[in-house]
Image: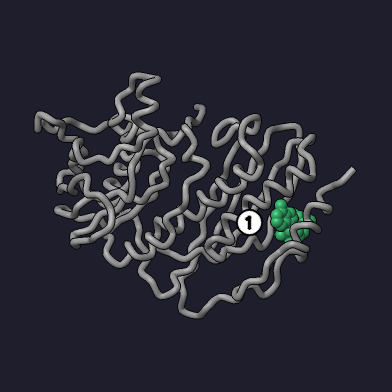
Amino acid sequence: MPGEFDLIDWIRQTQRNSPLLHLGIGDDLAVLKWPADELLLVGVDQVVDGVHFDSSVHSPRQIGRKAMNRNLSDCAAMGCLPAAAVAAVALPRDFSLDRAKELYQGLRQAGDAFDCPLVGGDTASWDGKLVLSVTILGRSAGGKIVTRAGARPGDGIFVTGPLGGSILGRHLTFEPRVQLGRELAAVATAMIDLSDGVSRDLAHICRASSVGAIVDAAAVPIHPDAVELSRRDRVSPLQHALNDGEDYELLFTTSAQTGQGIRIGQIAAEPRIFIRGEDGTPRPLAPLGWQHGIGR
Ligand code: ADP
Ligand code: MG
């Protein structure tokens, strides 16, 4: 029966070279050459069967791709360049070597699109479900880094694409906005990737920046998938666009005139978030977006 080392051997043999890579998979740690005077950004993001994907429906390649792309989207949100990633995987005991290789092809394809090699990882098999955790390293590469904390009263609030209904498929197939994030970093005062939904992710920016916001309901770009989902569940397309999450578009604030993004509102000094509807009346915007529960 094939084991962990057959998978690692295959990963090592099929590994691509990369300019920053001094020593890749096969030793206890990978070794990177890090350009002097560049900031190193690091983050980790995991996907869990039954929460972020459904292994009875989604292919290992799709799952691997999503796991890497979520991390690349975090790089986009900070305006950094992806540099390298490591992946830790807990495989169900009956997960075949071929399926594990497919999972890695998904990880690698997504990383290769942004010259972000997979330089190491850890493999376990167990009696539980598939869990895939990716740690990513990003580099400032001469650019400005954007946090959630810089939004100022008067800044416009922008999103980079239509929102809502990602559960119909885009949560797996989205393209992380890495290049766009780099460009926006030059003008954005704050930025975040839309993983939890506008209502919650805008609240993250407002809290970090100690500001509030007013969103113009009519300006929120609604994805056709939100309209489609609305037909099925009778939740309005706008509610889907505001709360669904996993759009992986960028939400950013700026006072500059930018040709990029769709303006959906404005940052305010008072630290509360409102949405202005058709009748012009502002109402509180509740953060109904996604949140993982934690037991007490
Ligand atoms: P250790 O027992 O020291 O943790 P491992 O056998 O786990 O060593 O790993 C050996 C090498 O294989 C390391 O370079 C590690 O980064 C790599 N590796 C192990 N599992 C994975 C994986 N799932 N994906 C990528 N690289 C892996
Ligand atoms: Mg190990």
Residue nearest the observer in this picture, 293 or 230: 230
Residue drawn where x is 64% and y is 53% of the image: 87
Label 1, residues with CA under 10 Å away: few <14, some 14-19, many ≥20:
many
Instruction: Give above or below for 246 relative to 237.
Output: below
**Whole-percent x, y for residue 45 in the image:** 54, 48
The answer to whether 33 appears left or right of 195 in the picture is right
**Whole-percent x, y for residue 251 in the image:** 32, 49
One can see residue 26 in this view? yes
Instruction: Give above or below for 226 relative to 134.
Output: above
Q: Residue furthest right?
A: 1
Q: Residue furthest bottom?
A: 36
Quarter of the image with the N terminus in it: top right
The answer to whether 215 appears left or right of 32 in the picture is left
Residue drawn where x is 40% and y is 37% of the image: 245
Instruction: Give above or below for 135 relative to 95.
Output: below
Q: Which residue is mark 1?
A: 108
The answer to whether 5 appears left or right of 255 in the picture is right
The answer to whether 134 appears left or right of 145 in the picture is right
**Whole-percent x, y for residue 61 in the image:** 64, 45
Residue drawn where x is 16% and y is 53% of the image: 153
Q: Amino acid at mark 1?
A: Arg
